[in-house]
Image (cartoon, rainbow, N blue to C red):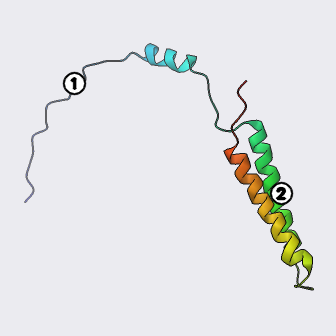
Amino acid sequence: MAQKFKPAAPVKTTAATSPAATGAAKATAPVQFIFDKSNYRMLIISVAVVAFGFVLMSGTTDIYSTTKIVIAPIVVLGGFALGFFAILKKPSAN
């Protein structure tokens, strides 16, 4: 059998905020993005470098070529390093 409970008294808040006061505070605060335009540009370039490294690594003929086992992995790691640098770089303060 389920017990029946009486509803509690309504909760009253002590501080009422007006919509005009909260809207004015939001309008004056400038929007600050985490990344700058240069960060996004470097991220896109790093993705392209990583993709180019995987293209160099692909293929079925001559799997032991210097391009596939030495150069392509270095290009991929360079692309990842550029991506990490793009993420960690602080945007310029203007």
Q: Which residue is mark 2?
A: 48
Where 88 sits versus 57, above or below? above
The quadrant holding residue 13 is: top left
The amino acid beneath tag 1 is: Lys
Residue 67 tag number: none
Where residue 63 sits: x, y (%)?
88, 85
* Residue 58 appearing in the image: no
Q: Residue at x 91, y 81 (%)?
A: 65
Q: Which residue is mark 1?
A: 12
* Residue 37 appearing in the image: yes
Give the class, few, some or many, for how many residues have Cα within 10 Å of label 1's Cα (few <14, many ≥20).
Answer: few
Front: mark 1 or 2 = 2
Q: Residue at x 88, y 70 (%)?
A: 71
Contact between labelled residues 2 and 1, with CB atoms less than 8 Å apart: no
Label 1 residue SS:
loop
Question: Toward the viewer: 1 or 82?
Answer: 82
Give the class, few, some or many, for how many residues have Cα within 10 Å of label 2's Cα (few <14, many ≥20).
Answer: some
Work out which quarter of the rendered image holds the N terminus and state it.
bottom left
Relative horizontal placement of residue 13, taking residue 83 as reference (left or right):
left
Work out which quarter of the rendered image holds the C terminus and state it.
top right
Where residue 85 sits: x, y (%)?
73, 49
The amino acid beneath tag 2 is: Ala
